[in-house]
Amino acid sequence: MPTLGSDMEDGTLVEWLKHPGDRVKHGDIIAVVDTEKGAIEIEVFEDGMLETIAVEPGEKVPVGTVLAIIRGSGAEKTTIEATPGRRPASIVAPPVLTSTTQPPLPAPPETARRLRASPLARRRASELGVDLGTVRGTGSQGTVTREDIERVAAQKAAAPQAPAEPHVRRDMRAAIAAAMTRSKKEIPHYYLSTAIDMSTAISWLRAQNEQRPITERLLAIALFVKALALALHEVPELNGHWIDGAFRQGAGVHVGCAIALRGGGLVAPAVHDADQKDLGTLMRQISDLVARARAGSLRSSELADPTITVTSLGDQGVDAAFGIIYPPQVALVGFGRISDRPWASEGKIEARPVVTATLAADHRASDGHRGGLLLAAIDRLLHAPQKL
């Protein structure tokens, strides 16, 4: 069971998308797990053959439990389980799981079978507001299909409906509360902020978007993420994790983007290697993450290893966002709305588009001087958007 954050303790195996004997390759989606963050697609990081399934649909198991055994191109067997970092480690399978005399696992209960659903069905259920647990599947082995979801949604639409109320999963809210409580108790936060003149950046964005199709236009968030990713090259002690009493610098710059979910709650999946991607690619990946997060189809690798988080609440009219660090990360950068404010320059005062950038950082890993250098680097980079 992969770890998808420091607040995750266990997960429920919803369904297997591959079966014993199937060939798998790096990047394949092999299973779906239900966690406090919602249904997460589990990737495989080995090429080979799925040999043994160790956890059946409906079972709730702790982080670190072996889910399956994959036989690679060589003779060694590997297991899918949780380890810190971006990818599950490949290790020799424990004897109890590779024994040919292992007793068959019990069949999943009826409630677990009702949770079998194709990825498309899960997305449609999220889009149409249908509870998968109430749908009778007509697919193979009772799997819920897209048609099943749309049939139930049509029946629901035809019936009189009570006024809808905002709702967020209690387990997600509890997980968020636990992580943030732990963060405030254990991490000595310090906070900094700076106002950034966005005149050059906004003018450049307008000129760029005039040349792009509507579907490929850039938003300011792409500039924010790229500027932060490049700025971390100058202040690397803010990019990584605090583990076992020491700072561990991230192997790459993986920027977690805080995304508000429909009905409440949030997740922060990572844009991997954000410093190496052009703005168009970043914009497409951020848009894709938002869409899939709200449809409940994020991948395990996207939640396992952000090295820093960025939050942008400008579209909510927020002037400045002072966040709480998500452990084991050591920093969070926030951006408020871009609004016209009085700005003094060269002896004149004029209205300019300005954004407030904030930093919440862990005093064990850095200090205010280094945090200030990060904000100054972001400011400088946003003044030269053509170089991002």
Image (cartoon, helix red, strand yellow):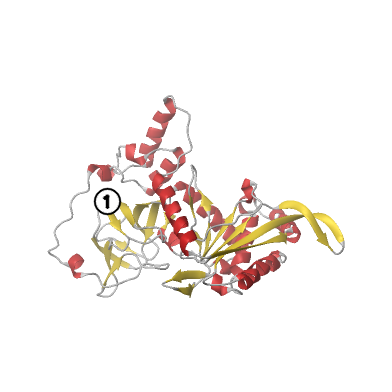
Q: Quadrant of the C terminus?
A: bottom right
From the viewer's perspective, tell me whether residue 16 is left or right of residue 185: left
Residue type at numbered disc 1:
Pro
Residue situated in front as seen by the camera: 148 or 183 = 183
Residue 43: x percent and y percent?
38, 61
Q: Is residue 114 above or below residue 65?
A: above
Residue situated in front as seen by the camera: 212 or 114 = 114
Residue 356 location, quadrant: bottom right
Residue 203: x percent and y percent?
75, 57
From the viewer's perspective, tell me whether residue 77 is left or right of residue 384: left
Please tell me which residue is depicted at 41% across the width and 41% down the height of the picture.
125
Q: Indicate the secondary structure of the residue bearing disc 1.
A: loop
Q: Is residue 260 above or below residue 155?
A: below
Q: Is residue 165 above or below residue 81?
A: above
Q: Which residue is mark 1?
A: 57
Q: Is residue 218 visible?
A: no
Q: Residue furthest left?
A: 101
Please tell me which residue is depicted at 50% across the width and 61% down the height of the picture.
270
Residue situated in front as seen by the camera: 15 or 12 = 12
Q: Residue furthest right?
A: 347
